Amino acid sequence: MAPLRFSANLSWLFPELLGLPARLRAAGSSGFEAVEVAWPYAEPPEVLARAAREAGLRLVLINTPPGDQEKGEMGLGAVPGRQAAFRQGLEQAVRYAKALGCPRIHLMAGRVPQGADRIAVKAEMEIVFLENLRHAAGVLAQEDLVGLLEPINTRITDPQYFLDTPQQAAAILQKVGRPNLQLQMDIFHWQIMDGNLTGNIREFLPIVGHVQVAQVPGRGEPSSPGELNFPYLFQLLEDEGYKGFVGCEYQPRGEGWPWGRELWRDWTGAVFSLSAEMPRPPSPYRRHSRGLELATFILG
């Protein structure tokens, strides 16, 4: 049984640091071996690739560009009339993925257009999405890349997002029928929209290419108070044979990454304190003989 592997989501972690190069350095010095980032496009890919190499990191996931955020866009894959912009954004994402050695790209579906009724436009948006996904699958296959579809909850995070349940995403993947398109499972979104995590993980894990985690409802780290039992969920992922990365896409409590005052808690509830003077602290998730430890952050 392979242990889970974790990646730092640099769009969420180390918020006190400006710029991806600084966050890459912080992730590397914190013990991470892999990172992911939503939109790396503010920095030249060569700069990011060099910073990642120097930090001893590999990039495992990026997103396609969001579109015109000033106009409320959050992805373009399913948006009618924006097919050309989606394909241009895909080309940019592929260039970055190749330069960064990143094997996966989240193909963002986008939002229901402002003023439109979700039910009325659902069929048209799905047709557009299928067309764009077939195109994307061909482009990605030429570069040996994988495209991911991520349902985002419409109850809390983004009421207008088109793709909002794993069932909807899996049905679309089946219609496209391309092996290099897979499902991105963000446990935060899945819990909010549908619950039934044990059943859904077991049902959909065979087509999952990436996992992300955050506690519900506060979207804090897995060890923060909330309704999800992450020791159970992590064990479930291991037991079901998941071999991809688990992205730490959560809002850390307080400022920064307070390694100096962390406590390690294993699955049996035992607590181990780490010295604040450690020059290179371990990653926020580590293996030991009693299971997968979860880092908890104690702030003063």
Image (tube, rainbow, N blue to C red):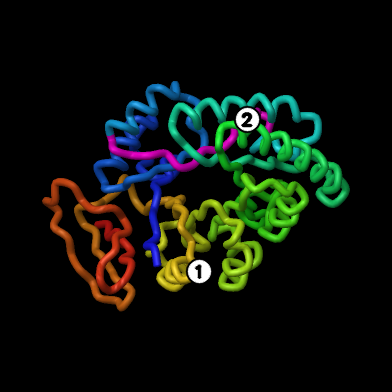
User: What residue do we see at 24% from left, 63% from top?
Assistant: 263
User: Looking at numbered disc 2 in the image, what kind of residue is underneath it?
Assistant: Leu
Is 66 contained in the magenta span? yes
Residue 165: which quarter of the image? bottom right
Q: Which residues are magenta?
A: 55-72
**Residue 147 or 47: which is nearer the viewer?**
147
Q: Secondary structure at mark 1?
A: loop
User: What residue do we see at 38% from left, 39% from top?
Assistant: 58
Q: What residue does disc 1 label? A: 240
User: In the shown orientation, is residue 288 left or right of residue 243?
Assistant: left
**Residue 1 or 297: which is nearer the viewer?**
1
**Residue 228 or 6: which is nearer the viewer?**
6
Residue 41 image position (x, y, % from top left): 50, 27
Disc 2: CA contacts within 10 A as few (<14), some (14-19) or many (>=20): many
Q: Which mark is residue 90?
A: 2
User: What residue do we see at 40% from left, 70% from top?
Assistant: 231
